Image (cartoon, coloured by chain):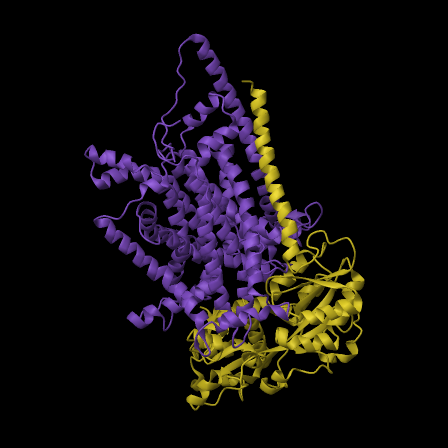
Amino acid sequence: MVVDRPQVTPQVTDATDVTVVRRRAAAVRRRGIVVRLGLMAVPAAFFCVFFAYPVAAIVGRGLHEGGHWRFGRIGDVLGDAGIRHVLWFTCWQAAASTALTLAVALPGAYVFARLDFPGKRLLRAVVTVPFVLPTVVAGSAFLALLGRGGFTDSLWGVRLDTSVWAILIAHVFFNYAVVVRTVGGLWAQLDPRQEEAARMLGASRPAAWRQITLPALGPAVAAAALMVFLFTFTSFGVVQILGGPTYSTLEVEIYRQTAQLLDLPTAAVLTLVQFAAVGAILAVHAWTVRRRESTLRLVDAGTTAHRPRGGERALLGGVLAVIALLILLPLGVLVARSLDGPDGYGFTFYRSLNSLGTSSTFVVAPLETVGNSLRYAAVATVIALAVGGLAAAALVRRAGRLVRGFDALLMLPLGTSAVTVGFGFLITLDKPPLDLRSSWILVPLAQALVGVPFVVRVMLPVLRAVDDRLREAAAVLGASPLRVWREIELPLVGRALAVAAGFAFAVSLGEFGATVFIARPDSPTLPVAVARLLGRAGPDTYGQAMALSTILMLVCAASLLVLENLRPRAKGADPSPGEF
Amino acid sequence: MNTIRRRAVGALVLATVGATVLAACGSDSSGGSGDTSSPGTGGSAKKSTTVTLVSHDSFAASDAVLKEFTKETGYTVKVLRGGDAGAAVNQAILTKDHPQGDVFFGVDNTLLSRALDNGLFTPYTAKDLGQVPADVQLDAAEHRVTPIDSGDVCVNYDRAYFTTHKLTPPTTFADLVKPQYKNLLVTENVATSSPGLAFLLGSAASYGDDQWQAYWKQLKSNGVEVVDSWEQAYNERFSGSAAGKKAKGDKPLVVSYASSPPAEVVGVTPAPAQSPVGVATGTCFRQIEFAGLLHGAKNTAGGQALIDFMLSKAFQEDMPLNMYVDPVRKDAAEPEVFTKYGAKITDPESMAPDKIAAKRDEWAKSWSSIVLK
């Protein structure tokens, strides 16, 4: 794939040409504004209808009582020492989890981006599996690792369950793939020759890395950090299961106030507090990133990876050991439990799963849940790519406050309690033409809301790295916007598109989103069926839940492998610099 | 070239992308609803042959029984479910101006006052109400809700543990604070779990409004462990369940249901003489679940027919093995696995719904300051 193109500057020879070029340039710029507004229309409408309106409605209902706004509630709630403690814990555990995830996963990002080793593709799909597992299931695997009688207990007598360490380590487990995929995606496309050139000019390896690679990676690292932070900031199941009842996050508190106690005023205040915290984080993110994003030399990912040499072998070994210990071991526990039947190891639970779907509305045949999951995930991915892709395209060019604000707004759903959005849906999407409450489409729409931030954050650094002059030159030379996009941007962003699609797909497979807590028409997905099985007593239900979880893992890994192979390839994939 | 043409192209790009999105959604809607088990998703307002039941995650019924209802009445049941009982009731309250369905099932005595105070239901006297004992008819004056099932939250014990340790299993609340049961009990967080709340209410009913705090202080010093959900307590921490054995649970006492022992032997061949799980019969709190016709229901006649059907013998006898609850109908036979392996709970604790509504927040707060701090 040729992407390392020479920059084309129109050759200016005489005065008339200059005028023509100027006029064209002005027209291109004018058109740029129109196109950008046009591009923003769809994501803006999506965001308003499926996020801003429902959230505003549920917060409004909480704070607007008997014809008056009760802002006094804010003081009451914030004055509560328990709430302040929850807020403090939520923030610091998210910051610590993010730092720990980056520290553990950045070497992994390098290894997956730059080193060739057997089984790399499969392993990249496998590290994403935790992301889709229901937290109840993953939490149970973690207890087997860190809890009483678990791996660390039997080896060193160390029990980490109900300690904050269990929460932090589990957050690394869940979010490892976010860093590996977001950062690794860009890293693989950075031209290694730049760093090599710097070294040839006398820079030491660390200096070359610090001055060439790190600044280029900055935006992707910041994007990954932002998403991990938002995800851990709104952590729900992990904190409940591994932290025990003494640890509580803002998300848990909002869920309790909304879904259990129906104390909407308190929930509304907590939601506003959550917005304030997320807003602050987004501002910090925008501030750190704004100056760093730059045009980069992007090359085909296939050409940058090499067999490990020297110290890289040790690095590869270290990363593989971390993956084995942190990700494969817990997943292995689940698989082992799914096979550990009443008559020794075997497929008893898998076989008994098949007989479940026949008689009752409660459980459904596993094949049907796989179909439901894949169908929802496919629709959610299409929606997220369309909305997120358009948004990213609109945000590519550096622009004024309005556009930057739009960028931040699109991130908000990641940092907002699912129960707030879900209950907001209930009271807003209940009248024609938006009577979507009992429609199946609400589920993928809600999941796309979580998928869009991933698509935008993955696409944006790559899109911005595309040399603007390439685009402008092509436009000035008369290429249509569609052609510019097809010939210049698509080949460069194909990989990012695949990574983004992978996230959107995984978000949906993993049942993230606002519809989790609300009643919906019955076409249960894999995670829902797992949760139902875990929710009842019985000699086989737990084993069946583990078997179904194993099927979920396989479906996830297989889908991601297929998705990566689907990614658009540029025509004429042979790297011959100079072709234009 | 002229800018107009380029603008037109730009607009075309947008239109194409937009159309693709719509087409993708549209085409999937036909593929999606064709395969799913819920017919008529989306615009279901055409005829009133569908009656919509809104419920919580645990609702279950046999397909055959629901088909029987369709055969008898001509109505097809569409089920919307999500969240636990508390979340489901609160959703119904939030949407009471535009209800999601015709009938709500799953409001229990701990949540009943909230539902009734919010005017969730339209009164309807079910046909077979005469078959239902008076003590479970908690809205007998107005019939806004109809009792459908009952169940008891009780301490369960791991039979094998007490046999091998030559220890008598506890039977009452008072037993649980005895030293021989130190560090053996796991229960659920009152704030996040409905059996957790029921167990607290049971202890409060047994010891009185002012004495239960002292009881829980004793439980705390006797080493009671608290986790957030029933799933964790029963599947991970309890040593007597099939799940807990896999997860190497080490607590032989757990707060669960009186129906857990039969559930543990359903489908086990050859049938064991006893369930591996036993029930401390003096530690029970009775939960009663109700159904009601939602105020503003689109299909009132269908909703009434569904409530009648839920009290019919066919539905009542189908319920136990689907939801692990007891039928409220006097003449409904229990399945053999219930009579053989289940415990007879003769005198469970109970509490008036309005008292629960008045006290629960205050009690939950003081409970967590005693037990969790």
Q: Quadrant of residue A438?
A: bottom right
Q: Quadrant of residue B7?
A: top right
Left or right of B135? Residue A538 is left
Kindly give the residue lying farthest to the top in the view shown: A15
B100 or A390: nearer the eye?
A: A390
The answer to whether A365 is drawn above or below residue A125 in the figure is below
The answer to whether A322 is drawn above or below residue A540 in the figure is above
Q: List x then y, in percent, for residue A234.
A: 48, 54
Residue A545 visible in this rendered orientation of the protein: yes
Residue A400 visible in this rendered orientation of the protein: no
Q: List x then y, in percent, for residue A497.
A: 46, 42
Left or right of B82? Residue A274 is left
Kindly give the residue lying farthest to the left in the view shown: A202
Q: List x then y, in percent, for residue A406.
A: 52, 37
B299 or B77: nearer the eye?
A: B77
Instruction: Specify the quadrant that holds the C terminus of chain A.
Output: top left
Left or right of A309? Residue B295 is right
Instruction: Specify the quadrant that holds the N terminus of chain A.
Output: top left
Residue drawn at point x = 39 percent, y = 38 percent = A289
Specify the chain shown as purple. Answer: A
The answer to whether B334 is drawn above or below residue A83 in the figure is below
Q: List x then y, in percent, for residue B332.
A: 71, 81
How many discs mark residues in the rendered view?
0
Q: Colour of chain B?
A: yellow
Residue drawn at point x = 24 percent, y = 52 percent = A313
B55 or A320: nearer the eye?
A: A320
B373 or A344: nearer the eye?
A: A344
